[in-house]
C-alpha cells in the first residue's frame, strides 16, 4: 500500500498539527514534579511531628499526576489499623539515644520485635 503523492502534504500537515497540539496540551511533568517536591518540603518535611496535611484544591491541581503518589502516603498514614500498630510499637520502645542504650535495651527490643511480628501476622 503506497501513498499517493498528493496525500503526502496532507499527512505532513496532520503530523505537524498533532505534534503542536500535543506540545500545547501535553503533560506539565517538570512543573508538577517541582510542585510536588516543594509541597513535600514545605508542608511535610519542614514540619516534623505534624500530621500529613491534606492538599488544597489548588495544590491538587498543581501536583497533577503526582497527586496519586501523595495519595499513597495519605492512605498509609490514614489507616487506623496501621496507626494503632505504630502507636503500640512506639510505646513499647525505650529511648534509644546512643549505642549503649541499644545494648542495655536488647531484651526489650527483642520482645518488641516479636510483638511487632505478631501484630503484622494478625493484620493479614
Image (spheres, rainbow, N blue to C red):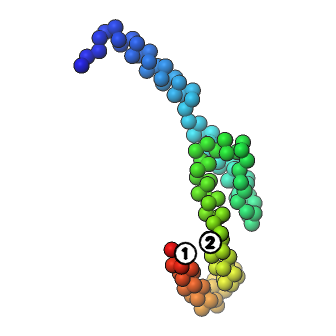
**Residue contact at pointers 1 and 2, CB within 8 angstroms:** yes
Of residues 98 and 15, the one drawn nearer to the viewer in this rendering? 15
Q: Secondary structure at mark 1?
A: helix
* Residue 45: % across, % down: 70, 58
Left or right of 65? Residue 60 is right
Residue 52 picture quarter: bottom right
* Residue depicted at x 58% and y 52%: 69
Residue 85 picture quarter: bottom right
Left or right of 51? Residue 63 is left
* Residue depicted at x 66% and y 83%: 93
* Residue depicted at x 39% and y 11%: 9
Q: Which sits earlier in the primary sequence, circle 1 or circle 2? A: 2
Q: Which mark is residue 97?
A: none
* Residue 108: % across, % down: 62, 89
User: Residue 96, can we see it?
Assistant: no
User: Residue 55, can we see it?
Assistant: yes
* Residue that lies at the very extreme toward the left in this rendered image: 1
Q: Is residue 10 above or below residue 18?
A: above
Q: Which mark is residue 123?
A: 1
Instruction: Residue under label 2, please give it.
Output: 81
Mark 2 neighbour class, 10 Å CA radius: few under 14, some 14 to 19, many 20 or more: few
* Residue depicted at x 64% and y 90%: 104
Amino acid at each position: 500500500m503506497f501513498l499517493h503523492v498528493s496525500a503526502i502534504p496532507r499527512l505532513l500537515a496532520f503530523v505537524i498539527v498533532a505534534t503542536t497540539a500535543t506540545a500545547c496540551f501535553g503533560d506539565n511533568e517538570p512543573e508538577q514534579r517541582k510542585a510536588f517536591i516543594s509541597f513535600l518540603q514545605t508542608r511535610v518535611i519542614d514540619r516534623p511531628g505534624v500530621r500529613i496535611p491534606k492538599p488544597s484544591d489548588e495544590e491538587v491541581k498543581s501536583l497533577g499526576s503526582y497527586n496519586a503518589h501523595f495519595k499513597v502516603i495519605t492512605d498509609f498514614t490514614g489507616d487506623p489499623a496501621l496507626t494503632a500498630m505504630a502507636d503500640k510499637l512506639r510505646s513499647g520502645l525505650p529511648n534509644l539515644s546512643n549505642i549503649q542504650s541499644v545494648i542495655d535495651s536488647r531484651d526489650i527490643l527483642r520482645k518488641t520485635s516479636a510483638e511487632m511480628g505478631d501484630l503484622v501476622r494478625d493484620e493479614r
